[in-house]
Amino acid sequence: MPGLGDSFSKRQGLQAAKPITIWEDAPEDFRRAVIVAAHDDCKVSSERLREIVCKVLRAKPNSNNWSEGPVWSEVDHLVEFCKWNQVYDIIEAIWGAFDRNAGVQVADHFAKARDVFEQKVNELTAEFGIGWQLTGGKVQARGDDTHETILSDAETALKSAGKVTALTETQEAIADISRRPTPDITGAMQHAMAALECVARDVAGDPKPVLGKLLQKYPDVLPKPLNEAVEKLWGYASENARHGKEGNAPTREEGMLIVGLVASLTNYLTHKVAPKDCERPLPAER
């Protein structure tokens, strides 16, 4: 069962990512490719894979299967027919189990195996057009490359500036939109706007107003007319997330849009002020 390895397509840059079309599914070919990557590229034995898969699925291993071929077939069958969200649970469990593989003895090898598996999984999700990615052992929602860069830059900027609260809100927004099997879109929008509100208060030097009022009170926080657009964005998020209406729930795409836009704005504002967390004492009103 050879893995793709350093294939011709990969060397020549011909493995272009497909547009994201899959969220609540795990295609059969993707399922198999994941366990092949764990087995062939990361040297996880069939027996160890069965142990991991059975633990996630709360299934009893077949005691009649003990040799490589039958055990592999058992793993393949279990992964093929489990629920789609359990496939991503299995991916997380495989990533977390490398430090217990019999053939791995050194901590550096653990990290290398995890990195290889994460890379392989993310290549596969891009290849299949799946809206998930493996990051630090957690399967999270992903957007296109630009979207991911925006989120990464925002997190990096918030960490560097010591803005703990805004960073936590941003991470919670990503976690909410990544929930399986059903994302918490309203929660993601609320946390994203809370992160922006936090940093905007820091820029204005005023810890009290909600974002909409703050932008009215301090119109120079953002360049004009962007401040007006962001005020409307806040109003939209407030209407659809904080005060959601029955039958008018925001879609995943809308949630991803809000989180991405807010991450860009948060990144901009973070670079506009000196490093300090918005929960610390702030200067008096300007």
Image (tube, grey):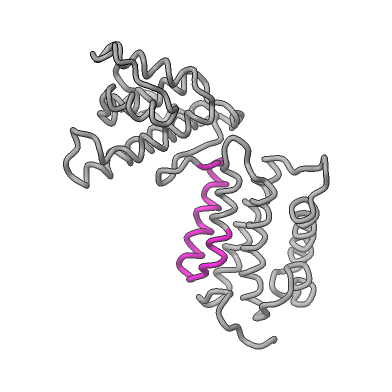
Q: Is residue 16 visible?
A: no
Say above or below: 261 vs 278.
above
In the image, 183 versus 41, the foreground residue is 183
Is 243 positioned to the left or the right of 131 in the image? right
Is 39 positioned to the left or the right of 142 in the image? left
Quadrant into which the N terminus falls? top left
Residue 10 pos. (x, y %): 38, 28
Say above or below: 116 vs 27.
below
**Image-quadrant location for residue 84:** top right
Is 232 positioned to the left or the right of 59 in the image? right
* Residue drawn at (52%, 69%) of the image: 163
Residue 130 pos. (x, y %): 54, 31
Asked if the magenta segment contains residue 244, the reply would be no
Q: What is the span of residues highlighted in magenta in the rendered image?
A: 140-169
Magenta: predominant secondary structure element?
helix
In the image, 71 versus 107, the foreground residue is 71
Residue 39 pos. (x, y %): 30, 25
In the image, 200 versus 23, the foreground residue is 23
Quadrant into which the C terminus falls? bottom right
Asked if the magenta segment contains residue 149, the reply would be yes
* Residue drawn at (64%, 45%) of the image: 184
**Image-quadrant location for residue 283:** bottom right
Is 41 positioned to the left or the right of 138 in the image? left
Residue 235 pos. (x, y %): 79, 59
Q: Is residue 265 visible?
A: yes
* Residue drawn at (61%, 57%) of the image: 264
Q: How many marks?
A: 0
Say above or below: 235 vs 98.
below
